[in-house]
Amino acid sequence: MTIQPVRLFGDPILRARASEVTEFDRELRQLVTDLVDTMHDDGGVGMAAPQIGVGLRVFVYDTGDSAGHLVNPAYTVIGDEEQVGPEGCLSIPGLRYDTRRALRVRVSGVDYDGAPVAFDAEELLARCVQHETDHLDGVLFIDRLDPAARKEAMRAIRESDWFEAGITVRTGHGAGQTGPFGRTR
Ligand SMILES: [Zn+2]
């Protein structure tokens, strides 16, 4: 187990575009392991590499029904149905907001050996793929909210103890209460 400190809103790495992975080495496998351990420790259903301070296009997921990792992921939306449901983020502890996402997506990428991965996802897994891929482009779920909800979210963030204290790295588990993509316990 290698649980890593989680970067919080305010850390610039969460706003940067992550780089494509070009080296499929032992360090990449270790990164995936660290992400899985840190995600599980925090009770999240997904975690992207920038959230533990690594600017590479990698994320892991575990919805309970399916679990895995993706390197250099991409997705396309299938159909035009949407879903609206509560979303949170381990990097924005304590906040959850109803967020609109595509209901179904077609996902592609490679695994840590560079072998192609492709699958269709819907509902929670589709939401997770969209949320985590956003992280790799420096986009956070609050950016997906309508203007009024986003304003409220920004106010809540500014009033958070951790943000007021200028804390952008969270060590140790149990600090978050964010539900899907945050804690589920
Ligand atoms: Zn997140």
Image (tube, rainbow, N blue to C red):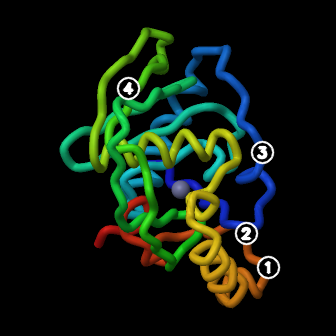
Q: CA distance from mark 1 to mark 2?
A: 6 Å
**Extreme residue toward the top, this view:** 115
Percent across and percent down for residue 56 are 67, 33
Taking 116 as reference, is 185 above or below it?
below
Give left or right: position of 185 versus 23.
left
Percent across and percent down for residue 181 are 42, 59
Question: Which residue was labeled with disc 2?
Answer: 168
Q: Which mark identifies residue 16?
A: 3
Percent across and percent down for residue 92 are 58, 69
Q: In terms of sequence position, does the residue under pointer 1 or pointer 4 come before the other?
A: 4
Q: In terms of sequence position, does the residue under pointer 4 or pointer 2 come before the other?
A: 4
Q: CA distance from mark 3 to mark 2?
A: 15 Å
Q: CA distance from mark 3 to mark 4?
A: 24 Å
Point 64% across, 59% down: residue: 143
At label 2, the amino acid type is Thr
Question: Which residue was labeled with disc 1?
Answer: 166
Q: Are marks 1 and 2 in contact (CB under 8 Å)?
A: yes
Point 79% across, 79% down: residue: 166
Question: Which residue was labeled with disc 4?
Answer: 106
